[in-house]
Image (tube, rainbow, N blue to C red):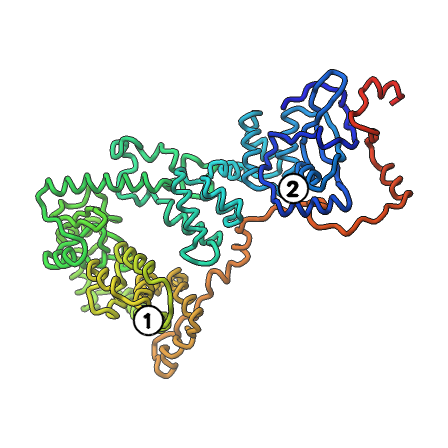
Amino acid sequence: MTATQTNFAEPHFGTIPLACVIPSKTNPRKHFDESALHELAESIRQVGVAQPILVRPLPTTESMIDCVEIVAGERRYRASKLAGLQSIPAIVRELTDVQVLEIQVIENLQRQDVHPIEEAEGYDQLMRQHDYTAEQLADKVGKSKAYIYGRLKLCSLASEAREAFFAGKINASIAERIARMPVLALQAKATQEIVHNYGQPEPMSFRRAVEHLQARYMLDLAHAKFAIKDAKLVSATGSCLSCPKRTGNQPEIYHDVDADVCTDPDCFESKVNAHNERKAAAAQKSGLPIYADGMEAYTKLRENNQVSAYDGLYKMDRLAKSSMSNTPIEDVIPADQLPKPVAYVKGNDGEIDAVYEKSAIQFALEKAGLCLTLEKHNALLQEKMSGNARDPKVSEKEKQAEAERRERTKKAELETTIRKAVYAEVRSKILQGDGHLTALRHIAKRLCDEWSFPHVIASDYKFNVLNFNEAAKFIDSASLEEVVAFILGMTIGECVQVDAFDMDDDEHLENPWYLGLLDVAKACDIEHDKIRSEHTPKPAEQQDLPVAAETPKKKGQQKTAETAAEAPKMAETTKDATDTKKAAPAKPTPAKKAAATNAKTDEVPATAWPFPTAAEMAAKGK
């Protein structure tokens, strides 16, 4: 509705028949809580409308206004109708369409509990219909530009996510992160996963939901197997660098996410599949052997003294730096410097990985200085054995370094023993538990397909845990307790093994899986400190072994204040007394008090609707 010039250049106050009041089509608020409306109606029935609604006149003739449009106060209008009132107190102001929308979207946000989706739609109206910018809106509402962009993204929510949001099953912060996903079907799927929370009675917390979305729906392009610059890999989508679904191309929305993250798992998967098909075709064309991932590949690589590019450097000889032992070969040797493949390994997901002669990889690593040549290695050994030609000061430093290495090794062995004992007790406790067997079997097989079982606890099982088929067969026939214990080993079990190079600092104590093991131990009433004490040698037995490190404080305990600060802040809103609680029965207002109240009102009440025209008011000396 568009207002034209009328006789209300100044605000007027009076009582208007409800039949002459028309709700605004531009009001962002579309959802009204029925129970809250009935509660407000009961309050109005007893004490009346405490605060007039704001309306603007709608033209019918040049001298008389018959109807008005609600600018602010539709809840009071609806509740008044429910209460059976025939009229409602109102302030009439001459307002343009832009002013109306500003009041409805901006001013009302400062004092009313408008739903974030309705808030977002209001911002969207101002930007699309009245050319507002995000900067102007941010300045108007006193928020950051990132806040405005985050709210605007809610307009892109799938219907399933909207329903969950309006029902209170997800909050605004979770909804904004779901809305970032460019595919509506994935939004719906993610919403269901967060709301149902793997069968838990409550939806995921904000922190858990963010972790879930990042793990399942935000993929790191820096570690993609395919070339992200390749526009021909999947011609329909083109290069990742210019794709709008790459976070770096929408910094206003993904200001808290790294630039090279893909937000479309379906597209990412299609490129992975295309990449695998391309590599599989090349492997077939080469005529080289193709090993099935699992026991066949494990056996063939050992028999033929071969390695793959994803193997760790610990498989190589004479490593120059022990701290790099777990680094994959492909991370230190550029693709153009790798030797020619001698075979391939085909994973269960269709991925093809090249296999190389171990000697060829060893040569490439020696050339890069990452491994010592046999001659240099032997020369260093000879120098250590002779010691006579060496500077005494240097020899002393080497002795000290060797002593420190032995000390770290002993500490690492002790730490491994302690963690293994904690893991064993946790596993024993879980074997007495209960859960959802079918779902857990699927999870266990998925983990087994994606990860390698930690070798330090592999002896818990009689079958070859590296063989997916054997593991899947075990899982399909395993009891609930056995499946839970298997999952525990696949996840938390990874932190049990501690290497000597881990003892250079205390970072190993902050390993998230180790902290997870401690959390589970605490939940199972297992005393980690007691186990550590039992396995730590007494001072008389220790000799040169240092006291074991104390149990680390969990990050959650150290950063409680920070976590609380990161949680989404609830906007403080002020409501009318009639909007928030049911008022007591009305009491008669003393005449003096009523007169004083009216005296404070700037507007002069009209005796009846329609209000007098400007000419009539002038004639009365107004």
Which residue is at the front of the view, 388 or 146? 146
Can you say whether 189 is above or below 13 in the image? Answer: below
In this view, the residue farthest toward the top is: 62
In this view, the residue farthest toward the front is: 84
Calculate the distance from the C-alpha at mark 2 to the C-alpha at mark 1: 56 Å
Q: Indicate the quadrant where residue 73 lies.
A: top right
Q: Amino acid at mark 1?
A: Lys
The answer to whether the residue labelled 2 contacts the one labelled 1, judged by CB atoms less than 8 Å apart, is: no
Q: Position of residue 436 (x, y in %)?
A: 36, 62
Label 1 crowd bin: few (<14), some (14–19), many (20+), radius 10 Å? some
Q: Position of residue 548 (x, y in %)?
A: 39, 73
Q: Residue at x 32, y 41 (%)?
A: 266
Q: Residue at x 85, y 37 (%)?
A: 598
Residue 501 visible, this orientation: no
Mark 1 — residue?
420
Mark 2 — residue?
112
Can you say whether 260 is above or below 323 in the image? Answer: above
